[in-house]
Image (tube, rainbow, N blue to C red):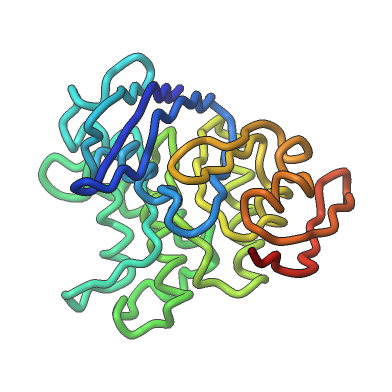
């Protein structure tokens, strides 16, 4: 399933956040979106998911304009994982993940839906949490539950807005390994906002860097994550080497005007 973004612009009141974004996301591709805080990364993800309506431009999924799709149709194509998710109700973890099956359920859940939930919980290694209250588990565990909910949704595209930011390094790698395997084995697409440049370098097929609402640079990790690109975007001097043929970035010092 292919996503085409053309001339996308979005503003909050008079503050233009996205400025003429053009981007193609291919099936079986893991794309990381990088950039300093406040450059429009989360806004772009929310526009792709239809949560925000851009003032200009088009987003198409396999040729269908997202403007013409109902919410339930979008939910069958796109699985969205926010930065965090709080529940106002004392839902069990199993029921929280079962919500991911909502686009596929016409009346009530079936044994198939329940098995999909169990499969997603096992993939994230949190099946032991199934009967616990979502609000009573740790923030990191909650985030893995939300990722499991998106996996249970069984869409062709995963949108992850800093989905691993609440996880320690071991669980970050665990979740990223799962996402990478899904992309490789099922041919789905993953679009991820990532702050850790080394995580992006290790797991991405393609990287874009947003800066001041525009795509500053895009391409393969080794072409994007260069000393010059990182310094000009983040204002940080770095050392870039290679490990397993992937860029490895070591921050050295901040540059001050």
- In-image side of 96 versus 70 (left or right): right
Of all residues, the one furthest to the left in this rendering is 107
Residue visible at 58% across and 43% down?
209
Q: Quadrant of the N terminus?
A: top left
Picture quarter with the C terminus: bottom right
Q: Position of residue 170 (x, y in %)?
A: 67, 71
Query: Across the whole image, how many numbered discs are drawn on residues?
Result: 0
Q: Is residue 7 above or below residue 218?
A: above
x then y, percent, for residue 136: 33, 85
- 43 on left or right of 162: left
Relative to 99, residue 187 above or below: above
The residue that appears at 71% across and 53% down in the rendered structure is: 231
For residue 74, which quarter of the picture?
Answer: top left
- Looking at the image, which residue sits at the far front? 257
Residue 139 seen from this side: yes
Q: Is residue 31 above or below residue 167?
A: above
């Amino acid at each position: 399933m292919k996503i085409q973004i053309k001339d996308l612009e979005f503003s909050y009141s008079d503050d233009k956040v996205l400025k003429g974004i053009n981007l193609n996301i291919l099936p079986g591709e893991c794309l990381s979106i990088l950039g300093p805080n406040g450059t429009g990364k989360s806004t772009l993800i929310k526009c792709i998911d239809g949560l925000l309506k851009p003032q200009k431009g088009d987003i198409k999924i396999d040729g269908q304009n997202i403007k013409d799709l109902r919410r339930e149709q979008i939910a069958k194509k796109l699985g969205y994982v926010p930065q965090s998710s709080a529940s106002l109700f004392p839902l069990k973890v199993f029921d929280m993940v079962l919500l991911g099956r909502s686009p596929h359920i016409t009346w009530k859940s079936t044994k198939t839906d329940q098995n999909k939930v169990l499969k997603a919980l096992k993939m994230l290694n949190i099946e032991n949490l199934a009967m616990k209250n979502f609000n009573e588990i740790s923030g990191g565990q909650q985030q893995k539950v939300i990722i499991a909910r998106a996996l249970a949704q069984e869409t062709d595209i995963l949108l992850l807005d800093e989905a691993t930011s609440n996880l320690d390094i071991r669980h970050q790698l665990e979740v990223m390994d799962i996402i990478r395997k899904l992309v490789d084995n099922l041919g789905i697409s993953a679009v991820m906002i990532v702050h850790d440049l080394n995580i992006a370098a290790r797991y991405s097929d393609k990287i874009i860097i947003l800066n001041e609402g525009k795509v500053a640079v895009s391409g393969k990790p080794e072409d994007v994550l260069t000393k010059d690109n990182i310094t000009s975007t983040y204002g940080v001097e770095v050392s870039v080497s290679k490990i397993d043929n992937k860029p490895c970035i070591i921050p050295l010092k901040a540059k001050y005007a």
